[in-house]
Image (tube, grey):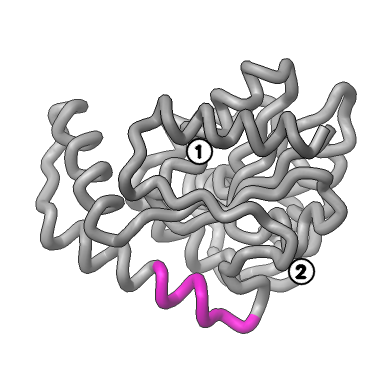
Amino acid sequence: MIIAIDGPAASGKGTLARRLARHFGLHHLDTGLTYRAVAAALLARGLPLGDEEIAISAACNLDLSRLDRDVLSAHEIGEAASRIAVLQGLRDELVRLQREFAGREPGAVLDGRDIGTVVCPDAPVKLYVTASPEVRARRRTDELLSKEKPADYASILADLKKRDERDSSRSVAPLKPAEDAHLLDTSEMDIEAAFKAAVDIVEQAR
């Protein structure tokens, strides 16, 4: 059982993926963290971010079941991850590892930008989770403030729009819904309503 979840930043796909994994008793992988983990390993050792062979070597040493979301969410790691994500050889290696993870019994929920289109194109359930940029910026702002971290709504909104443009227009694995993905717009939904809608979609597919 593989559930592929794609969507833009701050759409709620990660929260939804984790809840679906718990509900159905499946493994979970935030594929964005795999790029962040490689970036963190390179930064920790003072290694160059543009060397593809070094990045691939770091990827080969990852344990995808032990990625620390809190540690890897640091801003400087995210910036470094966006720089190494353009390395095609590294992308190929991480996709291979992500597919291996998806193949573990009894199945897995993977979320990211290219799960339904590249990583697991044959997944029996594909969701494309989205929301308006304004709603996503408000959610991200509220999340940061709840953790007593500085947050400026206007800056976050501008950053999300920039990321949307970059993710959707890149030549390699651009962000877009798979042709057979179920669109789930959570702009007017709270997490409970989004979760119920997602469970219904999965149950129908089963």
Instruction: Give the tally of numbered discs.
Output: 2
Q: Residues within 10 Å of mark 1 (few under 14, many from 20)?
A: many
User: Which of the two marks, 1 or 2, is nearer to us in this view?
Assistant: 1
Name which residue lies at 51% across and 75% down. 168
Quadrant of the rendered image containing residue 119: bottom right
Q: Nearer the viewer, residue 94 or 140?
A: 140
Q: Position of residue 108 (x, y in %)?
A: 76, 32
> The residue under label 1 is which amino acid type?
Gly
The secondary structure type at the circle numbered 1 is helix
Q: Nearer the viewer, residue 47 or 176?
A: 176
Residue at the spot of label 2 = 89
Residue at the spot of label 1 = 14
Task: Give the magenta-colored segment's residue range.
Answer: 164-171
Q: Main secondary structure of the magenta part?
A: helix
Distance between the alpha carbons at the discs numbered 1 and 2: 26 Å
- Circles 1, 2 touching at the beta carbon (< 8 Å): no
Give the label on residue 99, or none.
Answer: none
